Amino acid sequence: MRLDQFVANSTTLSRKDAKRAIAAGRVRINDKPCKQARQHISAHDSVQLDHQPVAIPEELYLMMHKPAGVISATTDSNQATALDLLPGELAAQVHIAGRLDKDTTGLLLLTSDGQWSHQITSPRRDCPKTYRVSLAEPLGESARKQLEEGVLLKGEDTPTKPASVVQHADTLLDLTIHEGRYHQVKRMLAAVGNRVTALHRQQIGPVTLDDDLAPGEFRFLTDDEVQALKG
């Protein structure tokens, strides 16, 4: 593997920024400076960036602050995808664990670990997901109770599982659900006579979107975050 590719895959640097770091002398191989981005790295080489060891993890785990207008897909010839926001070498190795609608913002998890992804998305796992929901109309007490008891969605035969509702204002609430039905949050609010005007996923299981991530930015999950989602 080329040195610039190795550095990009091992850190949050893009391929372009990795090349710049190498050219600036910030990268060392086996404790010796190397300014050649094309230098080949073997499995036995030790690589440092700014005197800190770097290594490609066995599996990749990332969180992204998904912006509006980006679809949760691997590729699309007509629309921007979440993977387009990653460096190419990184995007080629991961998939999305739990999609978001095009106009929904917030926490998106990406990984190369299929089993880990399945644990998050499988209905049997009952992994909670919390959304900040903006509404067109105030949420009344009756509607709130319906959400907390479970509602029957249009075109379906079984009601949703009970949701948790934390209301911040008449038209602003946090809704935690334990399923992943199609457009579930929007359909749940429609079922109680309301309409979602903005939707933002804040949390999946115990992992919360990093406040330091601007829309479109990403970071690698910590070991604790990865393990917490393994449950």
Image: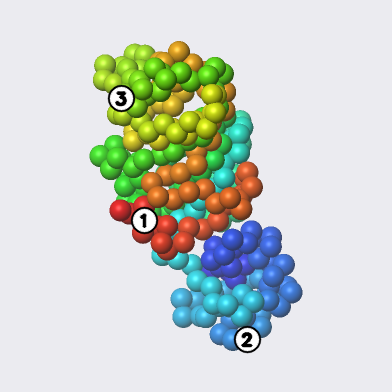
Residue marked by disc 1: 228
Q: Which residue is drawn at 51% across and 80% down?
A: 45
State whether residue 179 is above or below residue 144: below
Check disc 2: other Cα within 10 Å, few if <14, some if 14-19, many if 20+. few
* Residue 25 shows in the view: yes
CB atoms of marks 1 and 3 within 8 Å: no
Q: Residue at x 53, y 19 (%)?
A: 138
Kindly give the residue lying farthest to the right in the view shown. Answer: 24
Residue marked by disc 3: 149
Q: Where is residue 89 in the image (x, y as percent from the top left)?
A: 56, 56
Measure the C-alpha gap from mark 2 to mark 1: 38 Å
- Whichever of labels 1 and 3 marks the residue nearer the N terminus, that label is 3
> In this view of the protein, which residue sits in the foreground, 225 or 217?
225
Measure the C-alpha gap from mark 1 to mark 3: 28 Å
Mark whose residue sits in front, 1 or 3: 3
Res. 32 mark: 2
Report the side of 87 relative to 177 (left or right): right
